Amino acid sequence: MVGSGAREHALAWALSKSVEVIVTPGNAGIAAHGFTCVATSPSELDADLFVVGPEQPLVDGLADQLRAQGKLVVGPGVDGAQLEGSKAYMKDFFTAAGVPTAAYETFRDEESAYEFLDTLLPPYVIKTDGLAAGKGVTVTNIIDEARADVHDKLSGESFGAAGTTVVIEEGLVGEECSFHVLCDGTDVVPLTAAQDFKRVGDDDLGANTGGMGAYAPMSSMSDAQRDDILRLAIHPTLAELKRRGIDFRGVLYAGIMLTPSGPKLLEYNVRFGDPETEVLVPLYGDDLYDLLLRVAEGRLAGARASSSGAAVTVVLAAQGYPQQPRSGDVIHGLGPDGQLATPNENVIIFHAGTKRNDEGQFVTSGGRVLAVTGLGADVAEARRRAYDGAALVTFEGSVRRSDIAKSASEGEQ
Ligand code: AMP
Ligand code: GLY
């Protein structure tokens, strides 16, 4: 397992139901939970299966490098990773594949970007072309904010070189969903739909983040909507990947807006979502290893993934997240294994940004610190357990949303 966040912790935990898992580099909480964490680079490790968690190493060619060594890998090569690595590439891909998406244009020059903004209606959507850890997108109804954002991005102030090309898009309105499919280059196996909460504050206010919480399954999604997503987005994407000669073996995570005129693709990611993984993997029991092995081997044909139960995760972030997270605050409420001090089998704590201080206490060391996942028969029960668990974990200045999965659990009643 390659990576160091709560997503990798969740994957390691789920895969460990079937196999021995080694994480590189992992983090203090993953190690405390009993998983071997090593600093060795993946290409120097031996394993039956390599699962690459984050996008950056995929964009940098890790999967190609490992495959060249004859290893089995979950994660696309550089060619497939471009779908996430460049928004401009992704949007061109959507057009070529005929996938429904927001109208857009790409700019490197401020004046032309401002002129294009003037032709649009709010909300204005401005995206950094390169990777920006989920924080490169601005959605605003205020034209002056949109212009200022274009300036900050194109001048390199916001994201350095990664930001000096922007994509400006038509604003879409609707319910969002995170739709993950396992893909072996030819066949796909969809996972149940999840929902992620990207804004830092309750009621979707405040800055965009990597994600403040998630739940699955998204029971408000109808079978017809699910079929539409597969027919209009996923299958044409697979055909276009084939046409381009891209052998995509990994996870394709579609960010979709369910608009009144059907699903529209906001983006593709080429790996599991974070925090979506923290609610998806618990629903698949011990099937995950077999499914991922089939992804890597190109043997997905005929495979099925059936989920049971529900999960909700609440992210505890550091003070100042997402702009300037503070680190070094002692985390209270955790036992020596990094889980709740009072064990509870329906609550799992996945560590994102933690380390141990000299006294062995867990301290914050990143923007997103912990993801507290509650499991239950339905979203309402899982939500109660997640929030009851999260209430037991405290640190100075912790930032958390109180409305994760709120309307979904009310919708079940
Ligand atoms: P992205 O990283 O492209 O998924 O964008 C991050 C978030 O910005 C999405 O999850 C949406 O909430 C919002 N967003 C992105 N594109 C649009 C759009 N065209 N219209 C409305 N909201 C958008
Ligand atoms: N949850 C958003 C992401 O993983 O990109």
Image (spheres, grey):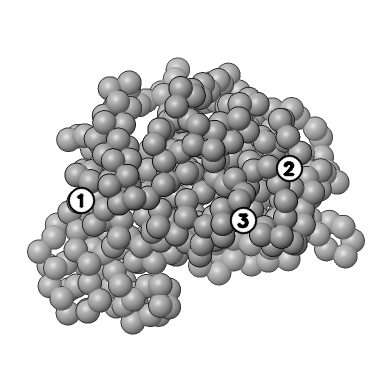
Label 2 SS: loop
Badge 1 marks a residue whose secondary structure is helix
The residues tagged by marks 3 and 2 sit, at their Cα atoms, a distance apart of 20 Å
Residue at the spot x=64%, y=43% of the render?
A: 49
Identity of the residue drawn at 67% across and 58% down: 42
Is 4 on the left-hand or right-hand side of 343?
Answer: left
**Comparing labels 3 and 1, the label whose residue is closer to the camera:** 3
Is residue 243 positioned above or below 222 on the image? below
The residue nearer to you, when weighing 63 against 394, is 63
Q: Upstream in the sequence, badge 3 or badge 2? A: 2
Q: In what quadrant of the picture does the C terminus appear?
A: top left
Q: Which residue is mark 1?
A: 96
Report helix, strand or loop for mark 3. loop
Amino acid type assigned to the residue bearing label 1 in the image: Ala
x, y percentage for residue 82? 38, 59
Q: Is mark 3 within 8 Å of ligand 2?
A: no
Q: Which residue is mark 2?
A: 21
Q: Whole-percent x and y of residue 61?
A: 51, 62
Residue behind mark 3: 69
Left or right: 179, with 73 as reference point:
left
Q: Is residue 175 visible?
A: no
